[in-house]
């Protein structure tokens, strides 16, 4: 599991970008990509879908999004990245 000091290190050394650039050029395009890839759609006829397929798709999309985009640290204006393995390990 990634320890706190490693996360702080990544917050200080990760890729530098402005918050606006992160949101518009990194986060939103990747979000659109995973929504399309995993065919995640809102169904107004069934707003609280209980299907396992949808839950699996949303989970996979979330992991992919998080691994590719990372977290934006507003204090350092840097992106903190995690691998898929680190994300899944943190969820276990």
Image: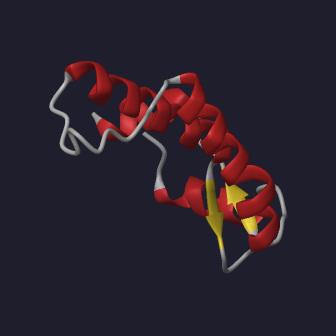
- Residue 18 found in image quarter: bottom right
Closer to us: 88 or 64 = 64
Q: Residue furthest top?
A: 53
Along the line of sight, which residue is nearer the eye, 44 or 62? 44
Q: Nearer the viewer, residue 73 or 22?
A: 22
In this image, 58 relative to 25: left or right?
Answer: left
User: Extreme front residue here?
Assistant: 45
* Farthest-out residue, bottom: 75
Q: Is residue 52 shown above or below 78?
A: above
Q: Position of residue 72 (x, y in %)?
A: 65, 63
In percent of the image, x 67 and y 52: which residue is there?
27
Left or right of 28 in this view: 48: left
Where in the figure is residue 45, as x and y percent of width and height?
Answer: 23, 40
- The N terminus sits in image quarter: top left
Position of residue 11 relative to residue 29, above or below, is below
How many circles with numbers are drawn on the protein? 0
Residue at point 39%, 25% (across, down):
57
Quadrant of the image containing the C terminus? top left
> In the rendered view, would you say 28 is above or below 59?
below
- Residue 90 relative to residue 71: left or right: left
Q: How is the image coloured?
A: secondary structure
x 21%, y 21%: residue: 52
Q: Position of residue 28 (x, y in %)?
A: 67, 52
Q: Residue 37's spot in the image, x, y percent?
A: 58, 23
Tell me if 54 is positioned left or right of 28 in this view. left
Residue at position x 84%, y 65% from top? 17
Whether residue 44 is situated above or below residue 11 in the rendered picture: above
């Amino acid at each position: 599991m990634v320890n706190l000091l490693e996360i702080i290190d990544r917050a200080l050394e990760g890729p530098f970008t402005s918050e606006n650039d992160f949101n518009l050029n990194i986060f939103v395009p990747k979000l659109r990509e995973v929504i399309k890839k995993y065919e995640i759609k809102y169904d107004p006829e069934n707003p609280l879908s209980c299907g396992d397929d949808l839950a699996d798709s949303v989970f996979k999309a979330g992991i992919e999004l998080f691994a590719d985009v990372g977290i934006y640290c507003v204090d350092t204006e840097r992106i903190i990245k995690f691998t898929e393995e680190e994300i899944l390990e943190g969820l276990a």
